[in-house]
Amino acid sequence: MILLLPVFQPSPGLALWSVIIFVLFWWLLSKFALKPIVNALESRQNEIQNALDTAKLARQEVSNMKSENEKLLAQAQVERSKMLQEANDMKAQIISEAKESAKKEANKIIAGAKVEIENQTKASIAEAKNQVGKMAIEIAEKVIKKQLQGNTEQENFVNDLVKDLNLN
């Protein structure tokens, strides 16, 4: 065997005291050093778990908010579509009403123009009849004058007729 120096040779008393000191050191270490370390590790583990739970809740809230936002967006699009449809319907109704009103106004104008044309036609016909009547009277007057020249009886008869007309 290898010879060891007396300092390095174990003795039973030294081994016993080494075990007692090691156990005492281990007990003191576990009592004063390991408990705070274990408590710190457990606290850190709890903090990490709380942070993970909080992150999970936040993720769920974000997911819920996202789905709510999508619902709101879909609802807004439906409302937008309804508003556009209502606007288009209203536009069509206004155009239809304007066309109907324009047709009525055009019919009124046409009816007024027809009445005016008819009145003008009647007035023109009456004017033409008056002018024809005047011309016929003038022609008859000239013919009668020519025939009555020299006939005193006819002149007296015409004078009597003229006097009767002036009196009435």
Image (spheres, grey):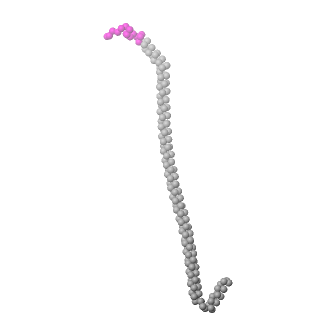
Question: Residue 27 colored magenta?
Answer: no
Check the image and report above or below for 87 versus 148. Answer: above
Check the image and report above or below for 105 versus 126. Answer: above
Magenta extent = 1-15
Residue under the image location 46 percent in, 16 percent down: 25
Check the image and report above or below for 102 versus 53. Answer: below
Q: Total number of numbered labels? A: 0
Residue under the image location 50 percent in, 39 percent down: 61
Find residue 9 and report its horizontal and vertical position in percent. Answer: 37, 10
Find residue 124 and report its horizontal and vertical position in percent. Answer: 56, 75
Residue under the image location 47 percent in, 36 percent down: 56
Could you tell whether 9 is left or right of 161 in the image?
left
Could you tell whether 22 is left or right of 119 in the image?
left
Rendered-image quadrant of the C terminus: bottom right
Question: Residue 6 colored magenta?
Answer: yes
Which residue is farthest right? 167
Check the image and report above or below for 88 versus 9. Answer: below
Find residue 49 and report its horizontal and vertical position in percent. Answer: 48, 31
Which residue is farthest left? 1
Find residue 136 and report its horizontal and vertical position in percent. Answer: 56, 83
Rendered-image quadrant of the N terminus: top left
Could you tell whether 119 is left or right of 60 in the image?
right
54 or 105: nearer the viewer: 105
115 or 55: nearer the viewer: 115
Residue under the image location 49 percent in, 46 percent down: 73
